[in-house]
Image: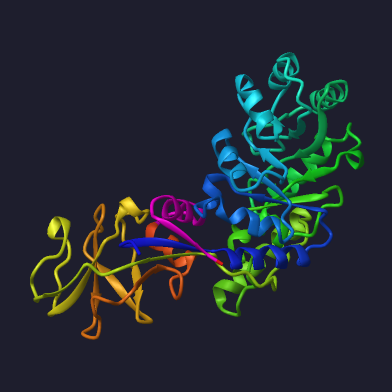
Amino acid sequence: MTDVYVEINRSNMALNARNIVAKYPEYDTFIGIVKGDAYGHGYGIVNALYENGVRYFGVSSMEEAAAFRKENTEAPLLCLEPVAIDRLEEAADLNLTLAIPDMTYLDALLDNGCRHPFKLHIQVDSGFNRLGFKDKNEIKNAADKIAASPYVLEGVYQHYATAGIFDPYFDAQTKKFRELTSLLELSKIPLVHLGSGIALMAHPKPDIATATRMGLMMYGYNISPDSYGSGVKDRLRSARDDYYRKKYHLSEVIRDVELELKPAMTMKCRILQLKDVHKGEHIGYGAAYTPDEDIRIAVLPVGYNNGIGHQNHGRVVEINGKLCPVVGEIGMNMMAVKVDKDTTLNDEVTLLGGHITLGMFSRFSGLGLAEVMLGVGKNNPRYYID
């Protein structure tokens, strides 16, 4: 095994897919978002999902689509970003579903001469202000043009900007989506998908939705909101939520969702050297850490080249079931951790997994959850287990 590596458990991915599909039978189609190299997990996980109920997928680029197709040639695959018109033949070869962000793109698609019977999804901008139509008459015009073309209008969708836990913007976007699609017969469009994993877990299914998209939860993370405790701060938060709900007539929020999900990604490394450092000596760049007692450190072959930023907000690693703190600044390929006298060179170090949750890793780095997985997964050798 290499000095540092990431292990991806496909059995956990399969379990997550089965449990999600069983939990939400009100949805006809589950769209697994595998952009960003499948959130750093690599496309070696797609068949574990496909064979267990996630039958549609979404990527962000032609390159990601090509990598996906090396693993699976059957699953419907939506490219969430508009494919360059001069690459449509490539898109046809990959059997991609195309996203339509505006009339300019649709007209260019209709004029291009490619006769492949592409399935199309109209992107609606309900307030995120990235890709998508913002006018209901243009959306109706787009649907009419597609109906008169060799292509098929398979879907229409939008993207939420917030989780809607106690803010009015989530409901405002849902209302805006209804308004913008009011000239369409949504019941005749097979895939209407509004939200993400957090929307799936925290809110009831909108009556117009037939499909849902999933990211983080699919990789093993229960991102449903927790109920508040009984402390003073929690009671204040609960009162705030009740105020917002009454003032803005907010939709129901579902908390503490019971759903068994298992993270698929772990990160491990070996120990390069064990070293005794005396009181008053310095460790690492900038001589920034000086122990106030004699300590023993383990030098590890990981750093920001491996997706672990040089920031260290209380970072720890796990060795023999014990949490060991990082000491000194993290370098490009190396860091030091404080260990006890029982640690040996043969001990395995866990940087993500075990007692080191994704949330902990995120707080250590000051990075988002998906950002952590992407950085770790893409910057280290990756091995799959079943």
Q: Position of residue 71 (x, y in %)?
A: 60, 48
Magenta stretch holds residue 371: yes
| Magenta stretch, residue numbers | 366-385
Q: Image quadrant for the N terminus?
A: bottom left
Q: Is residue 176 left or right of residue 11?
A: right
**Residue 199 visible in the current orientation:** yes
| Residue drawn where x is 43% and y is 61% of the image | 6
Q: Indicate whether 96 appears above or below 261.
A: above
Q: Indicate whether 71 appears above or below 365.
A: above
Q: Position of residue 363 (x, y in %)?
A: 42, 62
Q: Image quadrant for the C terminus?
A: bottom right
| Residue drawn where x is 73% and y is 21% of the image | 106
Quadrant of residue 25 within the rendered picture: bottom right
Q: Is residue 148 left or right of residue 289?
A: right
| Residue drawn where x is 66% and y is 58% of the image | 49
Q: Is residue 67 left or right of residue 279?
A: right
Relative depth, front residue between 286 and 22: 22
Q: Is residue 189 left or right of residue 306?
A: right
Q: How many marks?
A: 0
Quadrant of residue 110 within the rendered picture: top right
Q: Position of residue 128 (x, y in %)?
A: 64, 39
